[in-house]
Image (cartoon, rainbow, N blue to C red):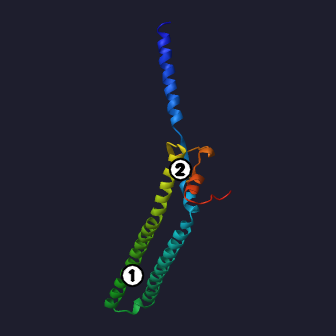
Amino acid sequence: MKKIVPGMFVIAIMMAGINVAKAQQKIGHVDIQYVLTTLPEYKEVESQLKTLETQLLKQSQAKEQEFQEKYQEYLQTSQNMADVVRQDKEKELSQLQQSYQEFQQNAQTSLQQKSTELLNPLYKKIGDAIEQVAQENGYSHILNVGVAQLDIVIYGNDNFDVSNLVLKKLGIDPPTN
């Protein structure tokens, strides 16, 4: 019996320690995508990206059309061309096609870079607000939810969703559902 009492005492202390650790942990979650798309600045970013995308698409279509027109001309006249002229036209078509492909790759890279350039300040602003909300409300961790296939939280009680607190911290009235 004397050996059992100290063992139970140790178990009781361990359980109390676990309960204290649990009490110190307050975990919330935020839907960063929801917060981002609710920001008024996001509409401007979205507009700028759409404008750039439209410009790049028009340029890409113009390059493709130029290639298609020259290719069709080549197909119609190639049988009557001298070998030197035909080789020159084939070289020109090859260069046009290569230029078109390079433009598409560069356009995609340019769009991604512009997106990063415009969105990073918004993500920084959201991150700062999340940190403030966590500190002000005693959260030890804030996890991100709402990103398809990248969610860290499988289940989260809505009572611990701090998305609207973050929006309020950013000076935005959360939309009502």
The picture places residue 30, in percent across and down from the top left corner, at 55, 51
Q: Mark 2 falls on what kind of element?
A: helix
Binning the other alpha carbons within 10 Å of mark 1 as few (below 14), some (14 to 19) or many (20 upward) gives some
- The three-letter code of the residue at mark 2 reads Val
Q: Is residue 174 left or right of residue 127?
A: right
Real-space CA distance between mark 1 and mark 2, rounded to the nearest whole angstrom: 55 Å
Tally the numbered discs.
2
Residue placed farthest to the front in the image? 136
Label 2, on which residue?
A: 133
In this rendering, is residue 156 above or below 19? below
The picture places residue 138, in percent across and down from the top left corner, at 52, 43
Residue placed farthest to the right in the image? 177
Q: Mark 1 falls on what kind of element?
A: helix
Q: Quick check: can you spot residue 74?
A: yes
Q: Quick check: can you spot residue 150?
A: no
Q: Is residue 46 left or right of residue 177?
A: left
Label 1, on which residue?
A: 96
Pick the residue in front: 167 or 96.
167
The picture places residue 91, in percent across and down from the top left corner, at 34, 83
Choose the circle earlier in sequence order: 1 or 2.
Answer: 1
Q: Quadrant of the C terminus?
A: bottom right
Q: Is residue 143 left or right of residue 81?
A: right
Residue 100 location, quadrant: bottom left
Query: Which residue is at 50% across, 57% downward?
Result: 126
Query: Which residue is at 57% across, 57% downward?
Result: 167
The picture places residue 134, in percent across and down from the top left corner, at 51, 47
Query: Which residue is at 62% across, 59% downward?
Result: 173
- The three-letter code of the residue at mark 1 reads Leu
Query: Which residue is at 57% across, 49% downward?
Result: 162
